[in-house]
Image (cartoon, grey):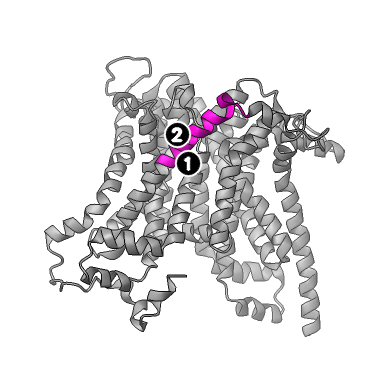
Amino acid sequence: MALTLSSRRRSRRLAADAGLFVFAAAFVLPLAWVVLSALDPHADLRVKAPDGLTLGNFDAILTSDITFTPLLNSLILCGGATGLTVVCAALAAYPLSRFRSRLNRPFLLTILFATSLPITAIMVPVYALFVRVDLIDTMQGTIFFFAASQLPFAIWLMKNFMDGVPRELEEAAWTDGASSLQSLVRIVLPLMGPGVSVVTVFSFVMMWGNFFVPFMLLLTPDQMPASVSINEFFGNRGMVAYGQLAAFSVVYSTPVILLYVLIARRLGGGFALGGAVKG
Amino acid sequence: MTTAAPRATGPGAAKSPSEPPPSPPVTPGGVPLRRSLVRALPISPALVLLLLFLAGPIVYCVWIAFTDLQLTGQAESSFVGLENFRTAFRDEEFLNAVWLTLVFTVISSLIGQNTLGLALASLMRRASKPVRTLTGGIVITAWVLPEVVAGFLLYAFFRREGTLNAILDWLHLPSQNWLFTLPILAVSFANVWRGTAFSMLVYSAALNEIPKEITEAAEVDGAGGRRRMWHITLPMIRRSIATNLMLNTLQTLSVFGLIWVMTRGGPGDKSQTLPLFMYEQAFQNSMIGYGTAVALLLLLVGSLFSLVYLRLLRTEV
């Protein structure tokens, strides 16, 4: 009996491996295209072995017009908004996690409700509103909106992480006369380092990849982040320079992939986010 | 890790998070108003941002959905009541967009991401570690990639000269111009490619919580794989399934960049889902009021799903 079970298990593992391979092969094709084409002097739309390795595509796009300015814009936009999000979320999470109040539950429910609203749907009114209050086509306006749209989820995550920090040390600080703010900054936040980095990286990654928000709220080409400029540059040129498009995609995507790997490692596998999102 | 230190201070640590801070004794009536205001002060920056930039636009959305606001610098807009909504339900393009949104959601979220995510997660439990890591890495990379990049990659994949047709040729199967003949199917598959990782992560976490003894007992009793899945696994993770379906659907309802990059809603309006329709009405046709009315409908559907999602989580808040 035991023997048949274990041999059945082995054959099942082989079957599972084979199944996963098929999925992996299907999923990897578009990724293989972008990597191979970026290095290919004669890239087209198919996955194929490069005609010879070249860094010419990277050379061609690494100019301030095509790459550096948009990436810098992305960095200012997403960095600013992420900073704002994390600071506001940490401040807001503290009383929610530490003090009991009748308003906590309704507030948290509203926050949770807001996390799943389709932001896409409110972009037209946001545009109209921004035109009216003269925030349209400004970096600060876009940063504020980015932060507000990411805040519900950031507060929710931050509060859950903060709940996991036991309060004994804090209570000692309170008796020593520390204020809430002091104990938040000196004690709670350092203890929840991994949690803060998850919120930070997650917010940043979401904004870095976001296309619709800057597409609607920014108009001047000089201010466009990479997510929009890639579309302008290559979409409007009839997409002939496939190798360059691929090279730009690689340059633009690498930071977020690295950041994700960073937190996935830190949390022991990429499964923490799924768990966090689940509730 | 530093977190271990306070946990070791006593057995009382486990229950403390649910208790109010012990410092000054709290009257049965609650904390005095002044102090609770001071305590709530740190929430204010977040609250201001949320009110100004999230609640504000939503209220504004409700208002201009009932007006004939236009893009072209006309100073006054007037209240038109339900006119925008009446127009919408008579507008064939709108109905087409609703239909395409439904198709897109059902194919890519309900069927695609959800089922594929579950399949991947359950295969991963049995597979060997290197294969598991490799597949997980690839699927998650597709998820982490910026939306526009994903759009370009799948545009290349589905183009007439693209990889999919190359494979079909190689297998001697008929190839076609997918983005032209079946654009909604192409963008749905694109969304599956991009979004499956989320379901996979949710289901991996859920499956890990099923005690091994239960599945093993069933296995010893001779329940086959399919029966174990149907009678044990699925009922045990049903909450995760519901949560995942909600979140997938909400995410799918607001996909814009992916479709915009791949097809711009075309050819014609054959892949124009509601977000793209809304954009076209508001900016290409300058009908901000009408576009917002469509946005409001989308927001209502989203809120409905969001409320269901809240109910599902209710016990956990």
* Residue B99 horizontal/vertical position (percent): 54, 35
As for residue A171 lying within the magenta part, the answer is: no
Q: Secondary structure at mark 1?
A: helix
Q: Is residue B51 visible?
A: yes
Residue type at tag 1: Met
The residue under label 2 is A213
Residue sitting at x 80%, y 33%: B175
Is A169 or B70 nearer to us in this picture?
A: A169
- Residue B221 image-quadrant placement: bottom right
Viewer-nearest residue: A115 or A184: A184
Which quadrant would the C terminus of chain A be assigned to in this image? bottom left
Where residue A15 appears, as percent x and y from the top left, is 78, 64
Region rendered in magenta: A62-80
Q: Is the residue at mark 2 from the same chain as the one at mark 1?
A: yes
Residue B193, placed above or below residue A64 = below
Q: Position of residue B264 (x, y in %)?
A: 58, 27
CB contact under 8 Å: marks 2 and 1: yes
| Mark 1, residue position | A207
Q: Residue furthest bottom?
A: A1
Which of the chains bears the disc numbered 2?
Answer: A
- The mark closer to the camera, 2 or 1, is 1
Badge 2 marks a residue whose secondary structure is: helix
Quarter containing the N terminus of chain A: bottom right
Q: Total number of numbered labels? A: 2
Q: Is residue A25 above or below residue B317?
A: above
